[in-house]
Image (cartoon, rainbow, N blue to C red):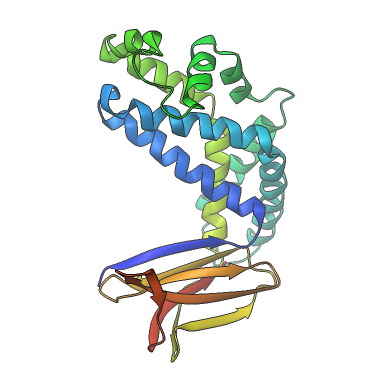
Amino acid sequence: MTKILYEHPLNERIRNYLKLEHLFTQAEDCLQRKMSVSHQVFFNALFAIIDTLERNDVRGDLIKDLEKLEQNLVIWSQAPEIDDSILAKNLQQTVELVCQLKCNTPLWAQLKHDKFLATLKQRFAIQGGSSSFDLPQLQFWLHQDNEILAEDVQRWLSLLEQIKSSLDLVLKFIRQRVSFKHIETESGFYQDSGEGVLLLRIKVDQKLPYYPTVSGNRFRYSIRFMSPCDSTGRKYSNNATSFELARC
């Protein structure tokens, strides 16, 4: 049975993490496609990553989360049922990432000083500003050999690798905190306390005619299920509802 997974953050830190994870997925997916076709997606994702890192202390948040994870891994190592080899690998990666992130100048800051990217970023910020007649240098770059394009893209993404690896590790352990529980409601509405919860993960059978919308914060949250509607766009689903929920 195929299920659709929905995720909703309950604080701004996790919201930034999920946003960055989505942007990294978009950027890396372009490596599998022709850059002449996918360059708009790639550069929009890359510039959105840079903006998110500039406007938020993501590096500081990741350092705190990794240090907390390091402490937990040391505690978990005392449990007899733990796989020592897997735990040691995660612990080593955590320690290395903390050391890398604590460097005075983050690697990704070099992207801000790349003259080619700076020119593109300025034009991409304008709606329709990335047309070929506005950016002849982009047209020139796109017509270079595929090896040159791939090398440039890999170089830019490599400067973000510390952030991405830290993000992947933190989100992996957040998502593994709890298992999914089956829940049924009679009215298409569900609410609960958000205390201690960072992330809601909701699975809904793909064949069911509704999807969840979430509102709330770390104190309390509610899930309202909606159905598509041709006249209004969407409408409340007041029927009996079945879904799976993980309160991470």
Q: Is residue 33 shown above or below 74? A: above
Residue 108 location, quadrant: top right
Q: Nearer the viewer, residue 17 or 115?
A: 115
Count of numbered labels shown in the rendering: 0
Q: Residue at x 27, y 15 (%)?
A: 146
Residue 210 location, quadrant: bottom left
Q: Is residue 9 shown above or below 106? A: below
Residue 143: x and y in percent read 27, 10
Q: Nearer the viewer, residue 123 or 205?
A: 123
Q: With 233 as the anchor, is 162 left or right in this view?
A: right
Residue 23: x and y in percent read 46, 40
Q: Can residue 168 be seen in the rendering of this structure?
A: no
Q: Residue furthest front?
A: 231
Residue 2: x and y in percent read 26, 68
Q: Residue furthest bottom?
A: 186
Q: Residue at x 60, y 14 (%)?
A: 113
Q: With 192 as the anchor, is 4 left or right in this view?
A: left
Quadrant for the C terminus in the image: bottom right
Q: Nearer the viewer, residue 246 or 138?
A: 138
Q: Residue at x 53, y 20 (%)?
A: 122
Q: Nearer the viewer, residue 41 or 72?
A: 41
Q: Is residue 5 shown above or below 169? A: below
Q: Residue at x 44, y 71 (%)?
A: 212
Quadrant for the N terminus in the image: bottom left
Residue 129: x and y in percent read 44, 22
Q: Can residue 11 be seen in the rendering of this structure?
A: yes
